[in-house]
């Protein structure tokens, strides 16, 4: 079998270089540039994701368990500088010692019965903040799915102090920025005898307020939530956990959840002003990522990347990835849900038939509002032969027309495409660029790809001297 799109002879799937540990930390004033980097780009792109996949001789089990590494790209007059650095967290320092002492997503620490009993009373949340970055007041923070965030210096990437997150035992990796107040909006789940979902707003380290709480009997696993101009949207799939059993379990966190499709999926729609919540039910599906949500008359529109079940989580265990690519059944698709706020009906609409993930929009201008374009990473299933083994395309979807535009290059695997708007008040929605970190398995490393967001024509690329492991999420900061 020929793996991927790499036509060279390989002994393993081409994409697997994206799951190798990167030990090198460098800082370069200028990367070699091919083509042209727009001179109006003058900010920072900071990406987050795993850089190490073992603790000493102990292999970590899941892609989501890798130790956090930040990557910084700085733009100035067509030039690009680069730096990468591990977050110096307690989890990282322990892993360097070969001590796996914190509960990760799917890797349980090696603990004695006494330490396990102590952890039931005083939970030790991992500070391995590898999922993304966010702005909190005047600081930038790295975030994960535990109630811990880590501040860092955006220029040097030096690790700062721990920053408190919303009260709870689980926090979605994705947050929102309130357009009016600038507050960071986050969703937490509180387990224990009185489990609940809690939406909180943070303006800085010291200031936090609870905006809404929803009691729930058995909480769902959630990675993100939606925000419209009038509502918070919590999408709770039937991938649920018994919170009391969770506290006693010897299993890794995610392996305590079970799939019960007969429950269906619930949309909790919360009024942003008063906190009142309504529940809307539909058939079962699983989702990691919300794309956008907005009101249209008496209808709430919610766009998501959906899966038939949570099998994608199982597909991303490292031993499985290193033997087989994710099965086709684990591919997400872009879907729209029309929620009738008056009559309670929920109608699903497919927006794109491609395998689609890591969605991005013109967030600053369009989040919570009607929009037309969404960008993501996709798998080429239209080759006429074997489909690709891992996302190998950047795709733009015109939601109004259904038209898709793609960028693709042999043996290259692009990551999340971050949209950066052109700095002009009267610009069109798709007037700007996309920034995607691409693994080039032909060597010698990865490169930062800059695409025209309107056409997906390549403008330029900046070469990095080492391969960068597949990461998760990043943001561009002016």
Image (cartoon, grey):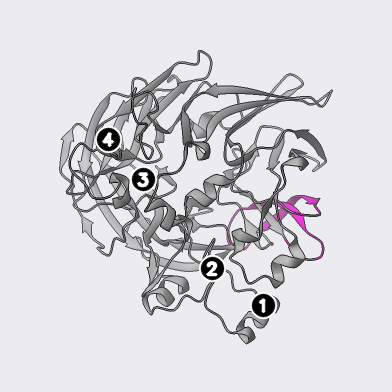
Q: Position of residue 264 (x, y in %)?
A: 74, 38
Q: Which residue is mark 1?
A: 122
Tag 4's secondary structure? Answer: loop
Q: Alpha carbon of mark 2 to alpha carbon of mark 3: how far?
A: 25 Å
Query: Does the stretch in magenta take in 215?
Result: yes
Nearest to the eye among marks 4 and 3: give it.
4
Using residue 240 as the reference point, say whether residue 15 is left or right of it. Answer: left
Nearest to the eye among marks 4 and 1: give it.
4
Nearest to the eye among marks 1 and 3: give it.
1
Quarter of the image for the N terminus: give it: top left
Which mark is first along the chain, 3 or 2? 3
Tag 3's secondary structure? Answer: strand
Q: Is residue 161 above or below residue 1?
A: below
Q: Which range is magenta?
A: 191-218
Which mark is first along the chain, 3 or 4? 4
Residue 78 seen in render: no
Which mark is first along the chain, 3 or 1? 3
Mark 3 crowdedness (10 Å alpha carbons): few <14, some 14-19, many ≥20: many
Residue found 47% across the figure and 55% down from its top: 317
Q: Position of residue 154 (x, y in %)?
A: 37, 56
Using residue 127 as the reference point, say whether residue 389 is left or right of it. Answer: left
Residue found 66% across the figure and 63% down from its top: 169
Tag 1's secondary structure? Answer: loop
Which mark is first along the chain, 2 or 4? 4
Q: Which residue is mark 3?
A: 45
Q: Which mark is residue 126?
A: 2
Q: Which residue is mark 4?
A: 5
């Amino acid at each position: 079998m020929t793996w991927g799109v790499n036509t060279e002879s390989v002994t393993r799937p081409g994409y697997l270089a994206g799951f190798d540990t990167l030990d090198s930390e460098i800082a370069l004033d200028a990367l070699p540039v091919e083509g042209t980097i727009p001179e109006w780009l003058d900010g920072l792109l900071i990406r987050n994701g795993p850089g190490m996949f073992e603790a000493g001789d102990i292999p970590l089990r899941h892609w989501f368990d890798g130790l956090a590494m930040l990557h910084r790209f700085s733009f100035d007059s067509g030039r690009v500088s680069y730096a990468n650095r591990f977050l110096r967290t307690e989890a990282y320092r322990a892993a360097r010692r070969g001590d796996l002492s914190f509960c990760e997503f799917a890797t349980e620490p090696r603990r004695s019965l006494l330490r396990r009993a102590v952890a039931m009373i005083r939970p030790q949340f991992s500070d391995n903040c590898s999922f993304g970055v966010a702005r909190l007041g005047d600081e930038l923070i790295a975030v994960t799915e535990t109630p811990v965030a880590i501040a860092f210096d955006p220029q040097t990437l030096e690790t700062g102090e721990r920053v408190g997150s919303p009260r709870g035992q689980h926090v979605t990796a994705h947050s929102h920025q309130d357009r009016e107040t600038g507050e960071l909006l986050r969703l937490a789940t509180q387990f224990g005898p009185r489990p609940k979902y809690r939406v909180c707003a943070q303006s800085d380290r010291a200031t936090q307020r609870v905006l809404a709480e929803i009691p729930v009997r058995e909480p769902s696993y959630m990675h993100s939530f939606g925000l419209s101009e009038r509502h918070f949207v919590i999408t709770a799939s039937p991938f649920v956990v018994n919170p009391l059993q969770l506290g006693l379990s010897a299993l890794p966190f995610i392996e305590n959840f079970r799939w019960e499709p007969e429950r269906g999926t619930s949309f909790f729609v919360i009024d942003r002003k008063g906190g009142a919540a309504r529940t809307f039910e539909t058939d079962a599906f699983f989702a990691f990522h919300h794309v956008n949500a907005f009101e249209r008359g008496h209808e709430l529109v919610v766009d998501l990347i959906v899966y038939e079940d949570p099998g994608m989580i199982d597909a991303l265990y490292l031993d499985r990835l290193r033997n087989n690519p994710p099965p086709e059944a684990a591919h997400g698709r872009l879907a729209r849900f029309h929620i009738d706020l008056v009559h309670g009906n929920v109608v699903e609409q497919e927006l794109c038939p491609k395998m689609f993930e890591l969605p991005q929009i013109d967030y600053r201008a369009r989040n919570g509002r009607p929009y037309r374009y969404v960008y993501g990473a996709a798998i080429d299933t239209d080759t006429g032969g074997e489909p690709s083994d891992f996302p190998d395309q950047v795709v733009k979807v015109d939601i109004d027309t259904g038209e898709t535009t793609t960028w693709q290059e042999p043996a290259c695997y692009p990551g999340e495409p971050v949209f950066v708007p052109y700095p002009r008040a009267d610009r069109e929605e798709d007037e700007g660029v996309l920034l995607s970190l691409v693994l080039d398995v032909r060597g010698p490393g990865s490169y930062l790809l800059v695409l025209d967001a309107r056409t997906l024509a390549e403008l330029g690329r900046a070469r990095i001297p080492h391969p960068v492991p597949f990461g998760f999420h990043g943001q561009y900061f002016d």
